[in-house]
Image: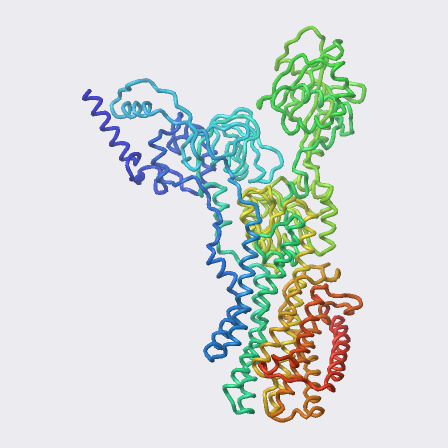
Amino acid sequence: MNLLKTWFDTFLRSRRAAGLFGRRAMPEAGFGRTDARMPPLLPSRTLMQVARDDLPAALSRLESHEDGLSMAEAVARRARFGPNEVDHEKPLPWWRHLWQCYRNPFNLLLTVLAAVSYLTEDAKATVVIGTMVLLSTLIRFVQEGRSNRAAERLKALVGNTATVIRRDLGTEAADVAERYFGTRLHSRRPPHRQELPIRDLVPGDHIVLSAGDMIPADCRVLVAKDLFVAQAAMTGESLPVEKFADVRGDEGGVLEQNNLLFMGTNVVSGTATALVVATGAETCFGAVAHRVTASDHAPTAFQAGVNSVSWLLIRFALVMVPFVLLINGFTKGDWMEAFLFALSVAVGLTPEMLPMIVTSTLAKGAVLLARRKVIVKRLDAIQNFGAMEVLCTDKTGTLTQDRIALERHTDVFGNDSEDVLKFAYLNSHYQTGLKNLLDRAVLEHVELQTELRLAQDYRKVDEIPFDFERRRMSVVVSEREDHHELICKGAVEEMLAVCTQVRDGDTVVPLDSRMLARVRRVTQELNEEGLRVVAVAMKETPPARDAYSVIDERDLILVGYVAFLDPPKESAAPALRALADHGVEVKVLTGDNELVAARVCSQVGLEGDAVITGPQLDRMTDASLIAAVQRYRVFARLTPLHKERLVRALRGQGKVVGFLGDGINDAPALRAADIGISVDGAVDIAKEAADIILLEKSLMVLEEGVIQGRRTFCNMLKYIRMTASSNFGNVFSVLVASAFLPFLPMLPLQLLVQNLLYDVSQIAIPFDHVDEELVRRPLKWNPGDIGRFMVFFGPISSIFDITCFVVMWHVFAADTVAEQGLFQSGWFVVGLLTQTLIVHMIRTPRLPFVQSLAAPALLAMTGVIMLVGVLLPMSPLAGYFGLQALPTGYWPFLVAILLGYAVLTTLLKRFYIHRFGWQ
């Protein structure tokens, strides 16, 4: 009893020293990041070390045991390493989202102007400006919230629980007693299994896996039986990958190791016991997730474009407003009135409705895209959709159908053969084991069941199951009870090892060295086409027995091959042509091998000089990479970081880049692109990284989205161009009038009201039509073009403003301070109507009203505003705004000015298009 107490005290002290009981984590000598005996938590390096270890060494490296960890050890490690969870992009708090919706140069400038108006006791201006900022911010806030809620809620990537092998506590105690006292109290007790939440897994745990299980951590295989794992989400490989427990060479990267399992992949068939090597953020998936959820990503093309245009207009205002202030101050002598007028000009120069127009246009685009099975998570992404010049896409499920299909069935010499298909069908039909994807592809030829008269002419005799040593399987059937046929199919080299003859038409010839070389040449050619080749062989035997074994798989006759491929979608080639017609270059970035990638791309019309692989990229300098990404269209055997590097290289060349992907390996590239596009069925980390989610993984849907994005951009550009040019013309007119008039050409309040009415007329722009020729090419922000447009068309309105000044001064004698109300009313109407009319003149490169008519909503809104402008000086509110009724003789001059303005603008628009083009 004393011996037992002494032993138990020693056991507790040893466990406490190791940090297994109590709150203390493991000390430096224990299993942790600072342990010199344990691997540093760098996923690739640690996993490669464990992959190269034999099983005892792997267990020792992770300080695990043959029968797993005890509960106490697991608790201590969980305290050290934390839960088995990866980073997810957390939704912004409402107040941060609201701040982001508010924060743009125009809103900030208008807020400053509103504050100045308030301090100078100009309450009317404060209300007008503040209302614009408030509406713009709230519309964007509400619409983005709706769009985010419309996106599918992210599903858990891995299952809720995992089956864990736990070491018996008595066995742990007996091991301690044996280690410290040389005496074993009892024999080793078997471990027990228990279901645990996957967040509780720790390095060193043993887990049990079977078909259908998601792999909850990065693991090393300990025991495997017929284990096939689908790694498409991580590597892009179409076919499941076979996994083994032993070390089979260390070629390739960590993702190519055949004894490692990765978080986020899933078991297709077979069973396994695996050793957990890394959990949570330390897994390969966790490293990808960390890059995706990091917040320090560069501004998109849309954000950069809006900012550049905004600062262009702000710089122009900062130059012009002081001139207005100084001219009016010196010529009129009333500096306060001059200041208020200059402030109004600043507001007029600031397209205060731009945030609202942009948001409304994007929101309208989001609604239209939703009808086309496209969910917009971030409104800014719509314009990037339209500006996209290069689309980088994964192969699987985008260009292909994401299924395995029987592509060819040939004889030994590569000629199509129905007999080979019949033998393969018999083999797949009668086998009772788990039918893999290749068997299912063969069995899709259901017509053979009738053609072969299976029920009448064939009877199954026996089966020799598949195993991973032989890499083949056989069935034995009786054909009309006359003879038995042993039909075998499997991997080419393993099949050649048991074949002695080949079928050549109706004859059988020996498989000598010359014939063997020919066979290998044919299979190599099939492999180079990107096909997965399975050999088919048979032999006839007398119907003397009913039991067969592996030893009977010899002296077979090779009859041919069945070859499989993930077939291309029928819509892929037309969609690629449509994208090319609209100026979008498509590049394929896949984790699959180069042979398969080249085959699929050639089938859909993406011919290229060569296929560049991930290992080749690793050897490239930045300069070589830039040259390669410009020249080549297909990249294969890529890791997630390869894809991200390629996207960043394209963006570094000034391209607007979109990326379409749905796997774990696509997430970093999705975040690095100007526009990340994922699909409804994607893994959750890909959907988190995406800006847009397609409810249907189709390039045709994507092409429709590109067109809608360009329409949205065109409508935004209309407002910016029209507002910038008309405001520039107004300021130019103000400078001329201020230099020669003894009074202000327009009161500050009148200028604000005119600007507000004009902006209200533009609210319908999101609903306007867009000419087809404007959406044929990618559309990008070009501040220089906007500046040129502003300087070119702005002075046209000034010509007619000055004409109005001359008419009001000389014809209607509005040439004194006492008559300034008449002068200001006349220019108020001319200025508002010419500003509104310009909407129709320059909204299209075509002849307005004849070749291109605005949408009914825009026609109605501009018509109403023009009517309000005409009636306001004659309404009861005229005195409030300092306006007065205009004489009858004014209206013919108004009509003449508007017609002259329309004609001159149309003529000069022709010249502008010929000289500079039209975006």
Q: Measured along the vertical axis of the image, is residue 326 above or below residue 309?
A: below
Residue at the top extreme, as displayed: 544
Q: Measured along the vertical axis of the image, is residue 634 above or below residue 512?
A: below
**Residue 792 visible, this orientation:** no
Q: Where is residue 181, by image quadrant?
A: top left
Q: Position of residue 157 (x, y in %)?
A: 52, 39
Which is nearer the eye, 683 or 334? 334
Which is nearer the eye, 373 or 20? 373
Q: Where is residue 914, by image quadrant?
A: bottom right
Q: Position of residue 837 (x, y in %)?
A: 71, 74
Q: Position of residue 745 (x, y in %)?
A: 61, 86
Residue at the left extreme, as displayed: 2
Q: Position of residue 95 (x, y in %)?
A: 46, 58
Q: In the image, 876: left or right of 276? A: right
The colouring scheme, among rainbow, by chain, secondary structure or one colour, is: rainbow
State the count of labels: 0
The quadrant of the rendering that contains the C terminus is bottom right
Q: Residue at x 50, y 79 (%)?
A: 122
**Residue 193 visible, this orientation:** yes
The quadrant of the rendering that contains the N terminus is top left
Q: Measured along the vertical axis of the image, is residue 822 above or below residue 851?
A: below
Which is nearer the eye, 532 or 498? 532
Q: In the image, 262: left or right of 837? A: left
Q: In the image, 281: left or right of 466? A: left
Q: Measured along the vertical axis of the image, is residue 159 above or below residue 750?
A: above
Which is nearer the eye, 147 or 821? 821
